[in-house]
Each structure stands twice: as C-alpha cells, then as structure tokens.
Amino acid sequence: MARRKIIFLPGNYYHIYNRGAHKDNIFRNNADYVFLLKYVKRELGKCVITAIAYCLMENHYQFLLRQDGEIEISKFMQAVFNVYTKAFNTKYKHSGTLFEGPYKAIHVDKNEYLLHLCRYIHRNPLEAGLVVKPEQWQYSNYAEFIGKRNGTLADREFVEMNFGSPAAYEEFVMNYIPPEKTQRELRRYLFWD
C-alpha cells in the first residue's frame, strides 16, 4: 500500500474529505449520519483531535480537524471509517469499495485559508440547494458555531478567537458570494436580452 505523503503533526490543521465510489451515496438515512457521528465523537476524544468544522452530505464528507496530541489523524480516520464501512456493507448488503479511494488530506497552514475553509464546509448544503440556511442542515456543526445548537463537536473557543462572536461568524458565512456565482450573475446581467 502506498504511503500518504502528508505528515500529521500536533497543533496543525487538516482538511479531510472523501466521497462515495461512483459518486454514490454513503449516507442513506438519518441513522447512517448518526451512527458515523457517534464514532467520530468517540474517536476524537481517544485520539485527542478537535473537530473544527465538519459537514456530512449524502455522497461525501468534509472535516477540518486539528491534531492536538501525538496520535495521528490517520489513526482516527482508519478507526472511524473502518467501522462505518463494515456497518454500511452489512446493513445494505453492499460489496466492493464504498469510497472513491483513500481520503484526501490537505495541510492547512495559512490562517486566511483556515477561516475560508470553515465557511466553505458549512456552506456546502446551502450551495447544493438542500437548505435555505446552513443551520437547517443537521449533519454539520454550523449550528454550534453560531450558538443555535448545543452539540459537542465544535470548538467554541476557535469561533471566539477567530471571529469574535457566533454572530460575526454567521455574518461571515451568510454574506459570502462564491466567485463563480458572482460571475454567473454578472454574465446573465450583461448579456441579458
């Protein structure tokens, strides 16, 4: 098996993501999401890793994690997704690979990128047209970021330190217009008949 080129180090942030093989759904109902989140919560504590932002969508997942201890994020990912894959395969009588390949991991070493990534992850269901407001998507920790839900998979100190308040983060997320959306609207305006 090929070794991963990224090195996981304490005190560092990482964007971790993957999607279903052939873009198939990896979550089929509420119970699937809840099952995964239960293991995520358990393993984060064991591995001394903090979930900064996360979003689980039907056919993919995204996590922004900070490794706080010596146990590498790769151990966390292996523990969580081995259990999830076995449970999914058993429950749905699925065979073959569940995921497109090994999860992707990007080291986040710039603060501006870190903050943008939080927003990007939390806007995922909004951009997909699944909700009108990001807090309506129950499979992310956005509602915790803005103080509208009391979950345990959020680092409230991170929000205070980087945004000042939950309300400031909500504004940061909601007042953002992705560049491609702006360009699409501008083209429609400029070339409107």
Image (cartoon, grey):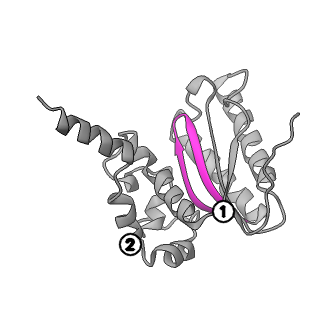
State the residue at coordinates (44%, 65%): 149
As helix, strand or loop, the secondary structure at mark 2 comes to helix
As helix, strand or loop, the secondary structure at mark 1 comes to loop
Residue 69 coordinates in the image, percent (x, y)? 80, 68
State the residue at coordinates (68%, 42%): 104
Q: Residue furthest left?
A: 193
The magenta segment: 49-66
Q: Earlier in the sequence, mark 1 or mark 2?
A: 1
Amino acid under label 1? Asp
Residue 41 coordinates in the image, percent (x, y)? 66, 58
Q: Residues within 10 Å of mark 1 (few under 14, many from 20)?
A: few
Q: Which mark is residue 168?
A: 2
What residue would you read off at disc 1?
Answer: 109
Q: Is residue 175 left or right of residue 76?
A: left
- Judging depth in this view, the residue of 33 and 66 nearest the camera is 66
How many callouts does the rendering have? 2
